[in-house]
């Protein structure tokens, strides 16, 4: 067995680590403003919306966790597990659990039974939006109350990421899920530093400090998460002092405006959302690769970045976001060349240009970006018609295979396999039984994607991912547009308790060390 063992230190001990005066604890509420009309749900296995994920991160723990402020898989650290071992072939993992961890709401101690229940629930498509991530899990068993063993059908990329405090890796209380039933989706029970207290539809979610948190009692008394969809109203609430932290706009002017405030810090962090223009190769004339290449040469990433602002937007480097394990930072992307685009259309028998239609969300940031692309394509003789609908309708219709082109911006778990599988494996094609988000009907790199998934040698695995990216780019299944960074702002009276450089949960992690002065 290859062993990974972490020494017990104060940060990870079962007892309190804070030396704060008890009379000062529990009196401060942190108020956060989010750009959303409502939360969708707070069951971490179904929480896929941007507004849901931060709240989930404050309530739940995984066996391991991303270090607060980091999105790196290289620095994952113990959470509910104190240590773990891995077999030499990478197929058997054994986790030793922390003892004495309590669930919120009097649901008792967290044990191996809860972990097994949670991972099996995460792997079930009836109860999880992330079930495909756990397809390689063969067995999950409780060896004893504080030991969990996972057997895999084959080694998987970054197994620890699947049991981290992210998506399906969050640990639930079996008793709570069974007792609450469908109510669990908006009355979650976890082990984190903050516990669910109240939900007001279209208004707010309130959390209260967990005095029994295994890392110590939080310095804050609670969190008020306000749902404010209108940009102007949210900005006003922040400016007037009603909010301590605010979800910003992906707009350089917004960042510069609040960056000039003496009592405000603007946080521009990763992971970025990679915007891709997916081209449906099952629709004419996009079934001709020359037409797709013409579209790629007609799009200028530089113009998109210039319009949005270089401090909040970066050029894409591949069809996988920058910084993921396995991203080819020097992928062979087509260069901006309108003349070449016109020549390719003529070669494809379309000298007078083409017309394609895209169903498009009315969300301002996404609509504006697509209108920029629309103007660029027009210069090359490509007419892009936009069928603008509300965001919910947009998501429903693009999954019905109705659009020639789909503008989609997303951040995913930072491993190449996740992005390649969801967007470019033919098994994930929309309209099929295994549908995820393959809007292009791409199958160019199926062999490489699937072989990489089970390749035990890390270097060979990266080589397969690189080859997959090259094949997908050559077939122009999607055109990379830009990477939009997350923008937040907080008052300088807020001390996160860590260096906020990354937000894997699409928002700041609020921990037991977070304080408000």
Image (cartoon, rainbow, N blue to C red):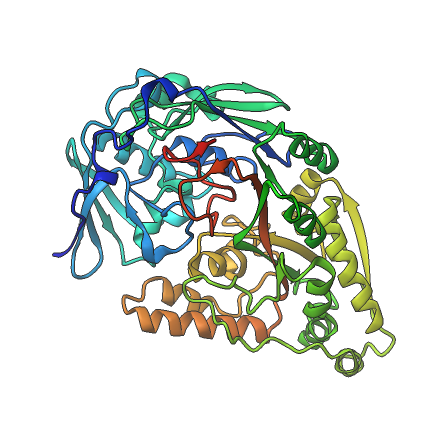
Question: Residue 35's x, y, as percent?
Answer: 64, 37
Q: Residue furthest right?
A: 352
Q: Residue furthest front?
A: 262
User: In which quadrant of the rendered view does residue 172 lie?
Assistant: top left
Query: Where does the image place residue 499, in percent across and percent down from the top left?
Result: 43, 48
User: What residue lies at 60% left-to-right and 37% top-to-bottom?
Assistant: 246
Please determine whether, in this image, residue 193 is positioned above or below residue 464: above
Residue at 37%, 67% (x, y): give it. Answer: 451
**In the image, is 502 to the left or to the right of 134?**
right
Please tell me whether residue 262 is drawn above or below residue 230 in the rendered image: below
Q: Is residue 239 above or below residue 195?
A: below
Q: Is residue 361 rendered to the left or right of residue 512? A: right
Q: Is residue 199 visible?
A: yes
Give the residue at x 74% y 57%.
370
Residue 381 visible, this angle = no
269 w.r.t. 108: above or below = below
The percent coordinates of residue 226 (x first, y second) are 59, 27
């Amino acid at each position: 067995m290859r062993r990974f063992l972490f020494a017990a230190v104060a940060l990870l001990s079962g007892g309190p680590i804070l030396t704060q005066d008890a009379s000062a604890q529990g009196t401060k509420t942190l108020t956060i403003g989010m750009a959303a009309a409502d939360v969708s749900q707070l069951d971490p296995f179904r929480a896929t919306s941007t507004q849901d994920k931060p709240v989930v991160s404050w309530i739940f723990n995984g066996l391991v966790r991303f270090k607060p402020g980091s999105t790196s898989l290289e620095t994952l650290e113990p959470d509910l597990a104190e240590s773990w071992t891995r077999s030499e072939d990478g197929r058997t993992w054994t986790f030793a659990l922390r003892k004495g961890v309590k669930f919120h709401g009097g649901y008792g101690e967290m044990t191996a039974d809860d972990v097994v229940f949670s991972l099996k629930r995460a792997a079930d498509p009836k109860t999880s939006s992330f079930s495909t991530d756990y397809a390689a899990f063969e067995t999950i068993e409780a060896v004893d109350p504080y030991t969990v063993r996972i057997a895999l059908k084959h080694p998987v990329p970054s197994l620890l990421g699947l049991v981290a405090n992210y998506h399906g890796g969050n640990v639930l209380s079996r008793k709570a899920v069974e007792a609450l039933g469908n109510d669990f989706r908006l009355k979650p029970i976890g082990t984190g530093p903050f516990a669910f207290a109240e939900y007001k539809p279209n208004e707010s979610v309130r959390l209260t400090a967990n005095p029994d948190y295994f890392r110590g009692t939080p310095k804050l008394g609670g969190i008020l998460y306000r749902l404010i969809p209108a940009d102007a109203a949210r900005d006003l609430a922040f400016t007037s002092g009603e909010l301590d932290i605010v979800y910003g706009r992906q707009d350089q002017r917004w960042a510069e405006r609040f960056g000039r405030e003496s009592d405000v810090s603007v946080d521009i962090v990763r992971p970025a959302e990679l915007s891709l223009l997916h081209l449906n190769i099952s629709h004419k004339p996009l079934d001709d690769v020359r037409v797709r290449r013409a579209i790629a040469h007609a799009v200028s990433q530089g113009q998109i970045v210039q319009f949005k602002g270089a401090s909040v937007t970066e050029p894409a480097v591949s069809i996988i976001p920058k910084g993921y394990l396995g991203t080819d930072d020097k992928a062979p992307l087509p260069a901006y060349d309108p003349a070449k685009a016109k020549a390719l259309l003529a070669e494809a028998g379309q000298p007078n240009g083409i017309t394609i239609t895209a169903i498009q969300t009315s969300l301002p940031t996404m609509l504006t970006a697509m209108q920029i692309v629309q103007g660029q394509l027009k210069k090359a003789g490509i007419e892009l018609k936009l069928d603008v609908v509300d965001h919910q309708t947009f998501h429903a219709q693009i999954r019905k295979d109705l659009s020639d082109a789909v503008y989609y911006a997303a951040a995913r778990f930072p491993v190449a396999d996740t992005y390649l599988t969801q967007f470019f494996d033919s098994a994930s094609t929309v309209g099929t039984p295994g549908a995820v988000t393959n809007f292009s009907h791409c199958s160019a790199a199926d062999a490489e994607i699937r072989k990489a998934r089970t390749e035990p040698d890390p270097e060979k695995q990266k080589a397969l991912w690189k080859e997959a990216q090259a094949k997908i780019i050559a077939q122009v299944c999607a055109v990379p547009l830009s990477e939009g960074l997350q923008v937040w702002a907080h008052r300088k009276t807020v001390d996160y308790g860590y260096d906020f450089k990354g937000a894997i949960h699409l928002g700041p992690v609020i921990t037991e060390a977070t304080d408000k002065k």
